[in-house]
């Protein structure tokens, strides 16, 4: 089974559905690659009626998000703000990163942060080695 291009924390837009949900955007909470479904915050809400099971528990109507098939949502690029397909670009560390098909911006914020942290630690270690060699 192919891997999914949408991950938790991404912003997506619903591209298929009724008038109430089509075109709305939200943040992905849960991704299930086995069933190819995603749960989007604030979209595809279902009302559940809950009966109180004890004196401390409160009953009533509760809205909760239901899963949407991944083919019914499109990824929104954080840089250009448009719905886009995903390209895979080889990064500096030899791993593939997700990028926007329209503007070419890297979508993997976590991977960028890891790369910048690694670069900062390398720079800091070089500075510390320089200061140690200067002291000697």
Image: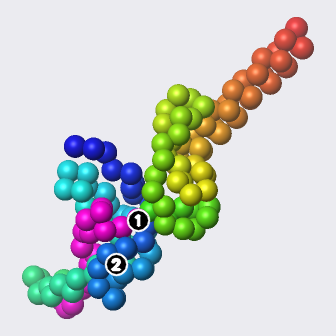
Residue at x 22% of width, y 83% of height: 46
Looking at the rendered structure, the number of numbered marks drawn on it comes to: 2
Answer yes or no: is residue 124 visible.
yes
Mark drawn on residue 43: 2
Q: Nearer the viewer, residue 131 or 13?
A: 13
| Colour pattern | rainbow
Q: Quadrant of the C terminus?
A: top right
Placement of 100 over or under 13, stated as above or below: above
Viewer-proximal residue, 79 or 126? Answer: 79
56 left or right of 23 in image: left
Q: Is residue 65 magenta?
A: yes
Element on which disc 2 rests: loop
Question: Based on the displayed image, in which of its 4 quarters is residue 129 positioned?
Answer: top right
Image quadrant assignment for residue 53: bottom left
Q: Quadrant of residue 133?
A: top right
**Helix, strand or loop under label 1:** strand
Q: Is residue 25 left or right of residue 29?
A: right
Pinpoint residue 16: horizontal percent, then vertical percent.
32, 75
Circle 2 packing at 10 Å, graded few (<14), some (14-19), many (20+), is: many
Residue 16, compared with residue 113, is above or below; it is below
Which residue does the image show at 85% across and 19% down from the upper left?
A: 131
Pick whichever of labels 2 and 1 is earlier in the sequence. 2
Q: Which residues fall within the magenta stretch?
A: 58-74
| Residue 27 x, y percent position in the rendering | 43, 68
Q: Residue furthest bottom?
A: 60
Disc 2 from disc 1: Cα separation: 14 Å
Which mark is drawn over residue 3? none
**Which residue lies at the image location 39% right of the left edge and 55% below the top edge?**
6
Q: Which residue is mark 1?
A: 74
Looking at the image, can residue 58 be seen?
no
Residue 107, horizontal then vertical, whole percent: 54, 52
């Amino acid at each position: 089974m192919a891997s999914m291009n949408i991950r938790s924390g991404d912003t997506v837009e619903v591209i298929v559905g009724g008038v109430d949900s089509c075109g709305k955007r939200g943040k992905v909470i849960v991704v299930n690659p086995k069933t190819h479904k995603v749960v989007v915050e604030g979209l595809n809400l279902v009302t559940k009626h809950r009966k109180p099971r004890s004196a401390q528990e409160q009953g009533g109507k509760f809205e909760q998000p239901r899963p949407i098939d991944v083919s019914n949502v499109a990824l929104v690029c954080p840089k250009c703000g448009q719905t886009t397909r995903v390209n895979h670009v080889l990064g500096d560390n030899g791993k593939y990163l997700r990028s926007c098909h329209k503007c070419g911006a890297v979508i993997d914020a976590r991977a960028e942060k890891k790369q910048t942290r690694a670069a900062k630690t390398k720079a800091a270690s070089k500075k510390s080695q320089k200061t140690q060699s200067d002291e000697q």
